[in-house]
Image: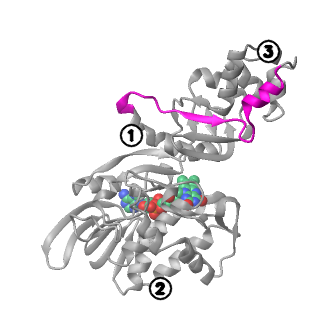
Amino acid sequence: MHFDVIVIGAGAAGMMCAAQAGGRGRRVLLIDHVEKIGERIRISGGGRCNFTNRNVSAENFLSQNPHFCHSALARYSPHDFISLVERYGIPYQQREHGQLFCDNSAHDIIAMLKTECDKGGVQWMFPCSVQSIEHIASHGSLRFAVTTSNGTFRCQSLVIASGGLAVPKLGATSFGYQIAEQFGLRVVPPKPALVPLALAPETLAVLKSLSGIAFDAVTHCDSAQFRENVLITHRGLSGPAILQISSYWQMQHYHKISNGKKPSVAIDLLPDTNAAAWLENHRSSKTLLPNLLSEFLPRRFAHEWCALQNAEKPLNEISRRDLDAIAHALKAWVLMPSGTLGYAKAEVTLGGVDTHQLSSKTMEVKATPGLYFIGEVVDVTGWLGGYNFQWAWSSGWAAGQFT
Ligand SMILES: Cc1cc2nc3c(=O)[nH]c(=O)nc-3n(C[C@H](O)[C@H](O)[C@H](O)COP(=O)(O)OP(=O)(O)OC[C@H]3O[C@@H](n4cnc5c(N)ncnc54)[C@H](O)[C@@H]3O)c2cc1C
């Protein structure tokens, strides 16, 4: 009933940490409350797990403490994880933007992590629910008592790797945040991120008939921008450019609501074109603006977008002032999303355990020796494209060297 290390949460970060600690000869118990572990890895990347990205830096992550992730990412980099994948002979491929996916299936990654844990002699316990955690600072080298549905276990190091809140049906819980609060840690309020955005009813009324239409655009929010597809859905906007910018839009909520500004997203509909010059060239055209815009945008979208702008006229009938406004809106179509589609459709959670209270080298809570937080439960959120798994591997590895 005594372990050197107990890891709670057998996801990406938890398995990496347990394998590392086990590999150092530590007696490790890995607990999860679900019946089947690795489900989030299994469904990731459309079943092929976008397990990392060739180009990873702190700039690809959002956090209230933007430099925190740097150390762990540098010490266990994409290169290290790729080497592990290659040692196991797992075939993989590189797609656009440096994203790496399994050729066959995400099962290859799960099997690799399980084997790594087995090599380190990690003991598994699932399904097993944790009922309470007690700090027993005065009990020799043992510092924590973990009471579970399978009994009480004591340990020297306790690692919380219980992930965020995205996709509750895969076993996501607020467990990690509760434990953080129990130990007096601040939690940056969690929000769904990498998530489709819901549109205000008046915009949705016009656009929802276009559900399924996608176009290339640049989304902007504060200083962040992403050029990818935008997809119109029956509830709002999705597609990679929207998922990426959604995290920054959520981030704006932390900063803007207090000073009264409503968070917004802007979309450049003509990323390769100087809209003002292009409109000027067609200034005397008798063609309807939506028909002209169909040169760049899906025809039906061009028509509905012009309807939203009240600009369905021939170009030569549009006033100079209106033309300037249209040029501006084409380059920065400003939307005030009414919300997101929530955790059910989110890929990750923004926010989490405030990193100012953790060591960036070890992930240990500065004020509570022996207690560690790793992976998505921590306030470090990656872009779409393999960054979130890389954070799980890097933070799990970092803690695994010290637990
Ligand atoms: C649909 C989808 C696709 C994704 N695709 C990608 C991708 O291709 N590339 C990428 O980089 N990222 C992807 N992500 C994000 C990535 O899956 C997560 O960032 C990553 O899994 C986080 O790792 P983690 O170990 O911190 O948490 P998780 O992998 O979520 O693991 C947490 C574990 O803790 C367990 N747990 C929770 N509560 C308790 C409790 N109370 N008691 C015991 N155990 C508990 C859970 O059951 C789970 O096994 C995707 C996410 C989703 C939802």
Disc nearer the start of the sequence (2/1): 2
Look at the image and tell me whether residue 164 can be seen: yes
In x, y percent, where is residue 323? Answer: 72, 20
The quarter of the rendered structure image containing the N terminus is: bottom left
Residue at position x 23%, y 55% from top?
A: 182
Type of amino acid at the residue the image marks with label 3:
Lys
In the picture of the structure, the residue carrying the numbered disc 2 is: 119
Q: Distance between the Cα atoms at labels 3 and 1?
A: 41 Å
**Image position of 318 with respect to 25: above or below:** above
In the picture of the structure, the residue carrying the numbered disc 1 is: 254
In the picture of the structure, the residue carrying the numbered disc 3 is: 313
Which residue reaches farthest right?
A: 286
Q: Quadrant of residue 254?
A: top left
Q: What range of the chain is rendered magenta? A: 257-283
Mark 2: secondary structure: helix
Q: Quadrant of residue 143?
A: bottom left
Query: Which callout, 3 or 1, points to the residue nearer the camera?
Result: 3
Disc nearer the start of the sequence (3/1): 1
